[in-house]
Amino acid sequence: MNSAEGPRRIDLHSHFLPAPYLAFLKSAEQQVPLGWSVEGHLEFMDAWGIEKSVVSVPQAFHFGDQAATSAMACLVNHEGRALLDEHGDRFAVHAALPLPDVGAAVEELTHTVEKLKLDAGVLLFTHYDGTYLGDPAFEDLYRELDRHGCVVWVHPPQLPPHESAPLPGHFLEMPFETTRAAANLIYKGVLERYPNITWQLSHLGGALVQLLYRLGMLQIAPYAGLSEEAAPQGPFEAARRFYYDTALGGSEEQLLAARRLPGVEHLVFGTDYPYSGLLFQPDAGQSWPWFSELLPTDGDPEPALSRVFDQAERRLIDRDNALALYPGLRA
């Protein structure tokens, strides 16, 4: 891609799948994700005006053996470093941490920041063994993330910690996972105690924005037991502190709401590649005519953005907000 031409988008929600990571999932008898290759990802980026993609592994890799989890986090981060060494002009990498062991996670964070020089923030899943972000169990990690001034990208794991959902997890549970974690971060006071951590939420924050009125009502209801000190200005202002990526959130209705809250300055572009691949197929509009107005077309991966935001705002979402959030992407 000629970086002097075109929109030069920055994709803050995409994935890479190193071979050792896939082999580890298979050995643990877990669902193995879609395949991935550097060449395929670069071809996708060139086709859709994406100058740089920030990648992470897509699903959690702790299955009870902490030593194996720690080893895999380290291996994933070294695979990320190798990707940067070969294609640092096109990729950045969210570091993986070996939670639920907080001590091991702090150690790996130091390793990634100081030795591997992965400067595009950290991936945290919404929960680890059913303990959600925001929980005091992760206090030592919050402290280190705050000390380093890290950006933390919050992503749902492959499955929620229960199996009672009436539809497969990808339908509803993944966005509601993000909602649970974000609400917990607010009401456990993490945003207030650790202001130097910047939080990016996947998939337009799940259902967080739509539920803020309900959260506000419960915050003032004595029977709910929520701490007003955790969100002293209420959930609406707390929610404005998050950044929200647009991955799989490309309808005008969703984007109109996001225009009001969090506002254009806290929206960042994301594709969810390779999991969104069906949307980018040349015959997608013919296959799903009811979806056709929202599908990628004419080199635009998310056309609804241009129907909701003007050209200057679109540039903020596509590129400039990402550079403000991750200054290392300018390199």
Image: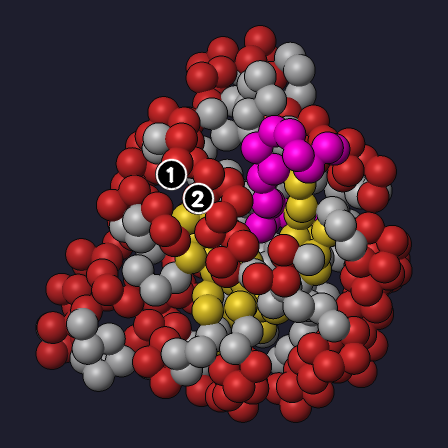
Could you tell me which secondary element the residue under label 2 belongs to?
helix
Q: Tell me where residue 124 sits by quadrant.
A: bottom right
Instruction: Give the colour scheme of this rendering.
Output: secondary structure
**For the view shown, which residue lies furthest in the front direction?**
4
Cα distance between the residues tagged 1 and 2? 5 Å
Where is residue 304 drawn, in percent x and y? 42, 27
The answer to whether 205 appears left or right of 273 in the picture is left
Looking at the rendered image, the quarter that the C terminus falls into is bottom right
Q: Is residue 248 above or below residue 132?
A: above
Foreground pick, 29 / 300: 300
Nearer to us in this view, 18 or 317: 317
Residue 228 in sight in this render: yes
Q: Which residue is mark 1?
A: 313
User: Is 162 colored magenta in this rendering?
Assistant: no
Instruction: Check disc 1 and report its element: helix, strand or loop.
Output: helix
For label 1, count other residues whose C-alpha is less than 10 Å away and answer few (under 14), some (14-19) or many (20+). some
Q: Residue at x 27, y 80 (%)?
A: 230
Q: Which residue is mark 2?
A: 316
Based on the displayed image, in which of its 4 quarters is residue 256 positioned?
A: top left
Residue 1: percent from left, percent from top = 74, 33
Q: Residue flagged by tag 2: what amino acid is it?
A: Leu
Residue 112, compared with residue 288, is above or below; it is below
In this image, 298 relative to 257: left or right? right
Instruction: Provide the residue span drawn in magenta.
Output: 1-17
Residue 229 position (above or below residue 287)? below
User: What residue is drawn where x is 58% and y is 9%?
Assistant: 286
Q: Position of residue 50 (x, y in %)?
A: 64, 37
Amino acid type at image mark 1: Glu
Q: Are marks 1 and 2 in contact (CB under 8 Å)?
A: yes
| Residue 129 x/y as whole percent | 58, 74
Q: Residue at x 17, y 64 (%)?
A: 216
Residue 246 seen in the current view? no
